[in-house]
Image: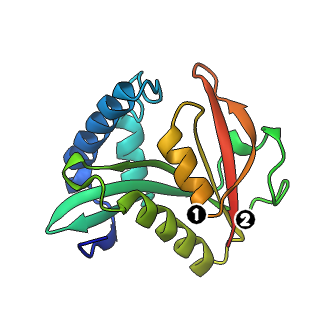
Amino acid sequence: MSEKYTLRRATSADIPEIESIFNAARAFMASQNNPQWKDGYPYADVVKSAVEGGNFRVLEIGGKAAAVFSVFEGDEEYDDICGKWLTGKERRYIAAHTLAVSPDFRGMGLARAAVREAEREAKERGFISVRMDTHTKNAPMRSLLLSEGFTFCGNMTVPGRESFICFEKLV
């Protein structure tokens, strides 16, 4: 990565920039034949709630949001997957979601940095693993997670959406 980023919690002032990053991510995924987020997810109310709940993180460069992701203490959608988590039914994990990089900063390794920041936060907070999922057609994210030492654990179908593949990494 050529420039150093600052990691911080998102604030309500970041919401327009976060939504802009997600709009660009949707367009990029569509150009890659990946239907993930095609329905407008993450929806404005999801973003607002996660920001207000302290769940969004921003990687900032030069005063601009360069990448965003969210972290949660567990995720009910992960309770029943078709497969098996490395840590079984254990609930002491960080679920990292909605990772996206601004097109102005693409190619700088910020998605990798965000994944590593989620791992660092999990470890610092005493969690035992990080769990993530992505659409089956999201080849860049699948490749990133495997290269970062995540293990494929199974599949899940989110009601009203398509199939996702699940990964976990012990921290």
Residue with the mark numbered 2:
92
| Number of residues whose C-alpha sits closer than 10 Å to that of mark 2, classed few (under 14), some (14–19) or many (20 or more) | some
Q: Is residue 2 above or below residue 95?
A: below
Residue 131 picture location, percent across and down: 65, 55
Give me the disc on residue 162.
none
Residue at image point 57% right, 45% down: 142
Q: Tell me: 78 left or right of 18.
A: right
Residue with the mark numbered 1:
148
Residue at image point 40% right, 29% down: 32
Q: Earlier in the sequence, mark 1 or mark 2?
A: 2
In this orientation, which residue lies closer to the viewer: 145 or 67? 145
Helix, strand or loop at label 1? It is loop
In this orientation, which residue lies closer to the viewer: 41 or 139? 139
| Number of residues whose C-alpha sits closer than 10 Å to that of mark 1, classed few (under 14), some (14–19) or many (20 or more) | few
**Gap in angstroms between the C-alphas marked 1 and 2:** 20 Å
Q: Is residue 57 visible?
A: no
Q: Tell me: 127 left or right of 112.
A: right
Indicate the quadrant containing the N terminus: top left, top right, bottom left or bottom right. Answer: bottom left
Q: Residue furthest bottom?
A: 124
In this orientation, which residue lies closer to the viewer: 69 or 92? 69
